[in-house]
Image (cartoon, rainbow, N blue to C red):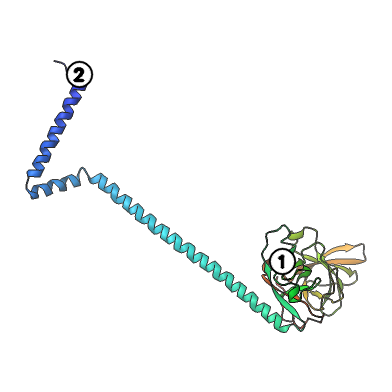
Amino acid sequence: MIFAPESYSSRRDTLAFVVCLVLAVAARMSPPVIQDAVAAGITRTVLAPFLFVQRQAEVVRASRGRYVQQAAARDSTLLLALQTSGLKQENEELRRILGLSSRLRSRHVSAEVLHQALPTSGLMVVLSAGRDDGVRAAAPVVAPGGLVGVVQRASAHHSVALLWTHPDFRVSGMALNGSVFGIVAPRGSEGPGTPMLELRGVPYQQDVPPGTVIYTSGQGGGQGVYPRGIPIGTIVAVGEEEVGWSRTYVVRPAVHPASISHVVVLVGPAVDLREAFSDTVIGS
């Protein structure tokens, strides 16, 4: 007699079920010692691969948890270090501002440079002092390193300062001993990307050596009279010659506006400020 495949499969399943049932009853009825031995054998053989996979999964979960904790701790440490570094820099700048304020003999107002995300951010800044603090248009803006710019307009509580990077910025400059005079302006017309200034209109026969510090002359400029003696920058090279009559010199600025967060606005009568900036070292 030939059995159909379906009938054979059904009989095989029934036989397997009966065998499992008999083994289950036998295991249930057997003494505890035998039950433990059978369980241990099954654990070592049939269940061993599954238990190994389970242990590995637990190890991976534990490792991932430790990694997440370590990454969070590392990020927190890095953030704290950055915040601490920023606070140290700000505190140092505030100390320098206080030092400059103590040396200034003219009336002045300290102000914070307010952050702004505008296309003109590299050319102009908003300050936290305004008319109520005595700030007026054409008031010079300085930092401990030297000249930053000039106030263009002021409201009751804020003011807008035009930086030396602005293409319209001009100031009369001189060497410390008064032997060289000229007009200082941004070099080129790149706006915020202009890294240098230039001293224009120096007579051709006058040679200004590199390293000469240029100060405001107090003789006036495009935005009003700047007090005498504010550092503008340092001569670093000879620029273009103007038809044989005068020379232009490249000037490295004393202050980069992007690096400052606090400034001083000069609101009193113009006085000679060379002593106030006598200990200023113009950075390289």
Assess whether mark 2 and mark 1 are in contact (beta carbons under 8 angstroms).
Answer: no
In the displayed structure, 138 sits above or below 52; it is below
Discs 1/2, front: 1
Specify the quadrant of the image occupied by residue 162. Answer: bottom right
Residue at x-position 72% and y-position 57% = 119
Residue 212 position, x and y percent, is: 79, 74
Residue at x-position 6% and y-position 48% = 31
Going by the image, does 70 lie left or right of 109? left
Report which residue position mark 2 lands on. 4
Residue 100 position, x and y percent, is: 70, 80
Mark 1 and mark 2: Cα distance apart in space: 93 Å
Specify the quadrant of the image occupied by residue 2. Answer: top left
**Secondary structure found at label 1:** strand
Please tell me which residue lies in front, 140 or 255.
140
Q: Look at the image and tell me whether residue 256 can be seen.
A: no
In the displayed structure, 255 sits above or below 20; it is below
Among the two numbered marks 1 and 2 on one chain, the one whose residue lies closer to the N terminus = 2
Q: Amino acid at mark 1?
A: Val
Quarter of the picture holding the N terminus: top left
Q: Look at the image and tell me whether residue 13 can be seen.
A: yes
Please tell me which residue lies in front, 148 or 199.
148
Report which residue position mark 1 lands on. 126
Q: Which mark is residue 63?
A: none
Residue 220 position, x and y percent, is: 86, 73
Please tell me which residue lies in front, 121 or 128.
128
Quarter of the picture holding the C terminus: bottom right
Going by the image, does 87 lie left or right of 96? left
